[in-house]
Image (cartoon, helix red, strand yellow):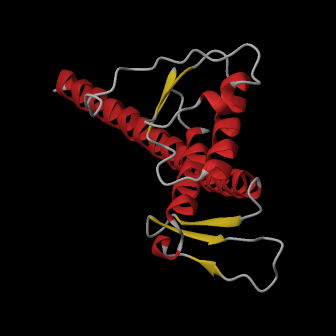
Amino acid sequence: MVSMMKKLQARKDELLICDRTYAELKASFSQRYKHWCREVKNKGKQAALDFNLRLSRKQHAGTLVFDHDNETLKLDVARNSQDTKAKSTSDARNLSGGERSFTTLCFELAMWEFCETPFRVLDEFDVYMDDTYRKIAVDTLLEICESQPSRQFIFITPQDMHPFLKRRDPMPRVVKMNDVRPAAA
């Protein structure tokens, strides 16, 4: 009988230890979740600032509104931040092709800040951009490359980048692939 009582007490002690461990883990996870929520909101604010900063290089303005509870993102862009009567739009169809491409690039660059990857790749980032937008985009991308020397960047475009790279020292490495279609005879 005494040995049964000892076994019962040992099991009760083990259960008490398990209950305490569970309570500590639950409190720890709750604390970590609160910290994570704060960080997500801070990252959203930082992304919104980066997005607006990148757009301002072309005298545009933009906001990113993250709704973390509903897991949505609203994007607004005003084409001329100097014009107080300029209307902002949250519908990308209201932007020209170049404005849409540039806005997309600015958004991607803002989001890149939170991705810890050793390399970054953009494919046809300059589609529909005119030379003004393309120059600003290429300058921005090259500044990012220079500020992050430990990363490898790959930019794929069918456009000729040499006019925008001439003044760079050292010149970035450019690999020009052969045309896929043979030249018309």
**What is the x, y in percent for residue 120?**
50, 28
**What is the x, y in percent for residue 91?**
49, 75
On screen, 169 above or below 9? Answer: above
On screen, 164 above or below 88? Answer: above
Residue 12 visible (yes or no): yes
Q: Residue at x 64, y 35 (%)?
A: 141
Q: In this orientation, which residue lies closer to the viewer: 120 or 41? A: 120
Residue 39 visible (yes or no): no
Q: Residue at x 53, y 68 (%)?
A: 96
Q: Residue furthest front?
A: 185
Say whether residue 4 is left or right of residue 53.
left
**What is the x, y in percent for residue 118?**
51, 20
| Quadrant in which residue 102 is drawn | bottom right
| Quadrant in which residue 71 is drawn | bottom left
Say whether residue 180 is left or right of residue 173.
left
Q: In this orientation, which residue lies closer to the viewer: 26 or 9? A: 26
Q: Residue at x 62, y 55 (%)?
A: 44
- Quarter of the rendering occupied by the C terminus: top left
Q: In this orientation, which residue lies closer to the viewer: 87 or 114? A: 87
Q: In this orientation, which residue lies closer to the viewer: 10 or 56? A: 56
On screen, 10 above or below 21? Answer: above
- Quarter of the rendering occupied by the N terminus: top left
Tag count: 0
**What is the x, y in percent for residue 125?**
49, 43
Say whether residue 30 is left or right of residue 88.
left
